[in-house]
Image: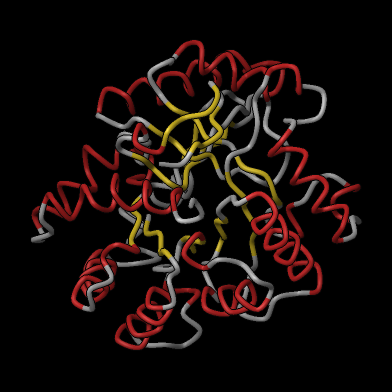
Amino acid sequence: MARIATVRGPLDSSELGLTLMHEHLCFPGGERFAQRAFEYQVELARKAVASGIRTLVDLSAWSAPDIPKVLALQERVPELNLILCTGAYLEHAVREEALKNAGEDEMVERMVRHLTKGYPGFESTGVKAGILKVAANTSRLTDWEKKNFRAAARVQKLLRVPIATHACAGARAQMEFLREEGAEIRATFYSHVEAEFGWEGRTLEQEAEYLVGIARAGGCLQFNNFDFEFDTPFPHLLHLINCLEDHGLGDRIFISVDANWEMDDHGRIWHEAERQHPETGRRTYAYLITHAVPMLLRAGVSLPRVNKYLMENPRRYFEALQG
């Protein structure tokens, strides 16, 4: 077993239960609608628990988490395990000037602090990060992205903490760079790899082989584009997952939602892409159980496979650096 830092404190990996490995806690609304937004976030978390979900991994690394609201959410929904991250999202999305201009050693120091002491100003709460998150936009990592990835690899070696990446494009390049920097690839996963705009001209079959190569090297692959037919038609997503299974690599698969949303100036809530594609408005955490899993089952994916993607594989991933 591994001990994982959660908002409520250390958790044994055996207690993760059904786990969504790539999600977001959202607290928009500004001063005018902050309470309405918070209550909606509570509602989403409660529905997740009601659907059977026990753990959410929040990979919102574009800024420090809103610890008071996270703690308030945890108090309102105590049945849900919340795992927070440290690291940095895409360079253009970094809002903190100090982080944008930080050197590699400063990035390392920041990550270590979040993982061992907690977030600045809230160390007394005991809330610490439990996973590293880094991101790149293409297969050609920029100098800033390389700095971020090198820092994460150093921290992983130092503290034995797993790494997650944003990898719509360039997942293999990210993996190879992390491996060169000494990261343990069994404790890395690459998100959104099914997004067809990031395939860099590869066909479906070529993309399948591309992902098989990552999984054979030990990397985990996260799929979330259910109801994102405009990015990945479901038959293509299914083909990639089945191809990994056919190669004996089903233990490298995660499925999640990547649920995120915002609130406009009128207090209306919009889920990602909902303005252009209204069907995506139903993509909450619970959606994975109420919609995505039934889609997979109807398509011939067995329940034991689903349980592997949602429970066994997350547990193995967090345990990869133990012992």
Return the residue nearer the eye: 224 or 253: 253
Q: How is the image coloured?
A: secondary structure
Q: Position of residue 22 (x, y in %)?
A: 46, 47
Tally the numbered discs.
0
Q: Quadrant of residue 302?
A: bottom left
- Quarter of the image with the N terminus in it: top left
Return the residue nearer the eye: 240 or 4: 4
Compared to residue 203, the image places residue 18 above or below, namely above
The answer to whether 197 appears left or right of 125 in the picture is left
Q: Quadrant of residue 71?
A: top right
Compared to residue 136, the image places residue 254 above or below, namely above
Residue at x 42% of width, y 64% of height: 220
Q: Quadrant of residue 135?
A: bottom right
The answer to whether 32 appears left or right of 165 in the picture is right
Compared to residue 183, the image places residue 173 above or below, namely below
Residue at x 35% of width, y 55% of height: 254
Q: Position of residue 3 (x, y in %)?
A: 49, 36
Compared to residue 310, the image places residue 102 above or below, namely below
Q: Position of residue 53 (x, y in %)?
A: 31, 32
Residue at x 21% of width, y 37% of height: 290
Return the residue nearer the eye: 221 or 3: 3
Residue at x 49% of width, y 51% of height: 322
Q: Position of residue 4 (x, y in %)?
A: 51, 37
Return the residue nearer the eye: 221 or 97: 221
